[in-house]
Amino acid sequence: MAAQQPTYQAYTVVKREGQDDFWLNIGAAWMHQDGEGFNVILQALPIDGKIVLRPPKVQGEQPQEAAKPAKTREKAGAK
């Protein structure tokens, strides 16, 4: 049986004063076959208790850039 790709990547967002937020990948989530829930596997726990789930991005894209909303990415590219 081939390993199924995760439905979501799990991140914790670290706020940094004067810099863009840092999106740290801490795990992944897989949807149940019946579509009624998820299995979440974490490799770390966020300090603030907040976990952000985002769909996986295209291979080769940087994880912290992949997880940022488009508005933040545009702002970062304008520097």
Image: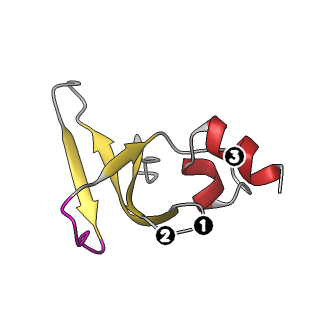
Task: From this view, report whether residue 21 is shown above or below residue 36.
Answer: below
Is residue 54 toward the left or the right of residue 38 in the image?
right
Which quarter of the rendered picture does the C terminus lie within?
Answer: bottom right
Which x, y percent locates residue 53?
Answer: 36, 45
- Numbered-mark total: 3
The amino acid at mark 3 is Arg
The tag on residue 16 is 2
Q: Which residue is mark 3?
A: 73
Disc 2 crowd rating (10 Å Cα; few below 14, some 14-19, many 20+) is: few
Q: Residue at x 21, y 48 (%)?
A: 39
The residue segment tinted magenta is: 43-49
Residue count near mark 1 (Cα–Cα under 10 Å), binned few <14, some 14–19, many ≥20: few
Q: Is residue 77 above or below residue 27?
A: above
Q: Image check: 73 left or right of 40? A: right
Q: Looking at the image, do the residues carrying marks 2 and 1 touch, with CB atoms under 8 Å apart?
A: yes
The residue depicted at 60 percent of the width and 59 percent of the height is 63
Question: Which residue in the protein does label 1 denote?
Answer: 19
